[in-house]
Image (tube, coloured by chain):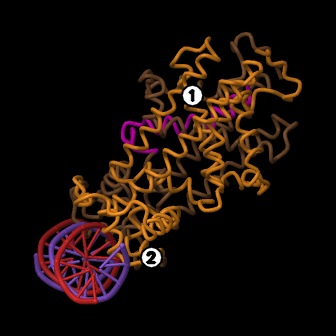
Chain colours: A brown, B orange, C red, D purple
Amino acid sequence: MIEEARRPRGRPPSDNCETREVLLEAAQRLFAHRNFMQVGIRDIAEAAGVSVGSINYHFGSKDGLLEALCDRITPALLEERLIQLQWVQRLEGTRYDRIKAVLHALIEPVLRWNRRPETRMFFTPFLARMRLDGPARVREMMKMEVASLRPFHEALRELMPHLNDVELGWRLHFALAVEHSLTSETERLMTLTGGEVDFDEVDRMVERAVDFLMYGGFGEVDRAETPFKKL
Amino acid sequence: MIEEARRPRGRPPSDNCETREVLLEAAQRLFAHRNFMQVGIRDIAEAAGVSVGSINYHFGSKDGLLEALCDRITPALLEERLIQLQWVQRLEGTRYDRIKAVLHALIEPVLRWNRRPETRMFFTPFLARMRLDGPARVREMMKMEVASLRPFHEALRELMPHLNDVELGWRLHFALAVEHSLTSETERLMTLTGGEVDFDEVDRMVERAVDFLMYGGFGEVDRAETPFKKL
DNA sequence: GTCTATAATATGATAGAC
DNA sequence: GTCTATCATATTATAGAC
């Protein structure tokens, strides 16, 4: 696949076509389980119940399809996060509560999206594959996601002014890692907990993560006894 | 590639051959940057400076090469972790110090390995790809890695008897996520910190992670002031 | 717009000379 | 043991009928 991948010659033919949509959904489902290279346009077309030619017609190329797939996922997710963040700005409560709310805004949307009926169990591995092995333009898009975290960075800086930017950057990085662990490596989590996890309890999972990020998981005997300095 | 992948007909010809070794190193280097499917046996052979036929001769198949690659990495890493864990058993100090030491034993080996001159910057993405898209037998091996964490699970249970197994499982899961974040998504970390990270400072990075796991990153104003209950 | 058929290419595995 | 040459197959993209 040449870097200068062929785009649709004129314009994308029709932006909201039946087959276009059914192709996108089939592709997303397939990419969740197998690699980008392992699933061919034939597989996608077959799963969608249309012909192979239609892929090149609607998206110009296989890479074009992948891009379209990301185009409709990533922005929607970011928007949801930002909406929740704006809620925080209006929130009454201790600084402590507000930090929690920011973390919630960061974590909850991904997790909830991951449980949507149409993408359940498919969404996250798909994104992981994209990030790792997707076509160049897609990987670029993924990187932009980090830039979109700026509002969170700034909200937290205001709430934790004692931290310099490097320090805060590290913690945000760790926070994203914990967020990530809620939707990936789920088999590991099941093994470690003896299968006692219900992935449908989104709120409970988010709470767990936020709690861990706030107080850590190994430094206290009993959380209730821990005399954290209230902010 | 059929599931019942062809193994070397007789036995693996010679276990310590010059070309065998050079092939393994070339493959690992290539798989670090591109997908398992994207890098062909021709690429590997060329990078190793040998012929394509030698791959099938020494490993039976492409999958066989991948397995051999994992075979020489995974056990070595586990061993290093367990050695460090045994050190903890003999350690004098507060329970608090001992928990830290367990986390250190969990995290440090991977990070140090990742900086070894011969695998620098290659090691972790390679493992990530393997976990995600490697051949079936390799993915099985990767899953066994979780089972190998049992000693850590038990060491922590002794040190934190107030936690039940489910609770501890969750925290171990988060701990592994933080560990993972030290070697993956490094670009994100660079962006978030404004480039102020020196990946050669292994000890400093481990300390950061352990600290975060112990106390969290968002729940206190100033760590020095935080009156954690000493164990 | 959607299909089928085909082209052009890349891959993993193998055969056989040396 | 290592090479080169070849096989059988799978891939994406395209051409052209309808």
Looking at the image, is D7 positioned above or below residue C12?
below
**Residue A21, placed above or below residue B146:** below
Measuring 69% from the left and 51% from the top, which residue is drawn there? B189
In the rendered image, residue A203, in percent from the top left (x then y), is placed at: 53, 25
Q: Main secondary structure of the magenta part?
A: helix
Q: Report the amino acid beneath label 2.
A: Ala
Query: Marks 1 and 2: same chain?
Result: no
Which of B43 and A75 lies nearest the eye of the viewer? Answer: B43
Establish if B110 lies above or below B66. Answer: above
| The C terminus of chain A - image quarter | top right
**Amino acid type shown at disc 1:** Phe
Of residues A95 and A223, the one nearer the viewer is A223
Give left or right: position of B110 versus B23: right
- Protein chain holding label 2: A
Q: Chain of mark 1?
A: B
Tag shown at residue B8: none
Image point (44%, 48%), residue name: B131
Q: Which residue is mark 1?
A: B152
Query: Residue placed at 78% from the left, 42% from the top?
Result: A168
The Cα–Cα distance between marks 1 and 2, rounded to whole angstroms, is 48 Å
Q: Which residues are magenta?
A: A97-124
Q: Is residue B158 left or right of residue A65?
A: right
* A93 relative position to B53: left or right: right
| The stretch drawn in magenta includes residue A119 | yes
- Count of marks, rendered view: 2
Q: Does residue B6 appear in the picture of this structure?
A: yes
The numbered disc on residue A5 is: 2
Q: Is residue B228 shown in magenta?
A: no
Q: Position of residue A2 (x, y in %)?
A: 44, 78
Q: What secondary structure is found at the residue carrying circle 1?
A: helix
Mark 1 in CB contact with mark 2 (< 8 angstroms): no
* Foreground pick, A130 / A97: A130
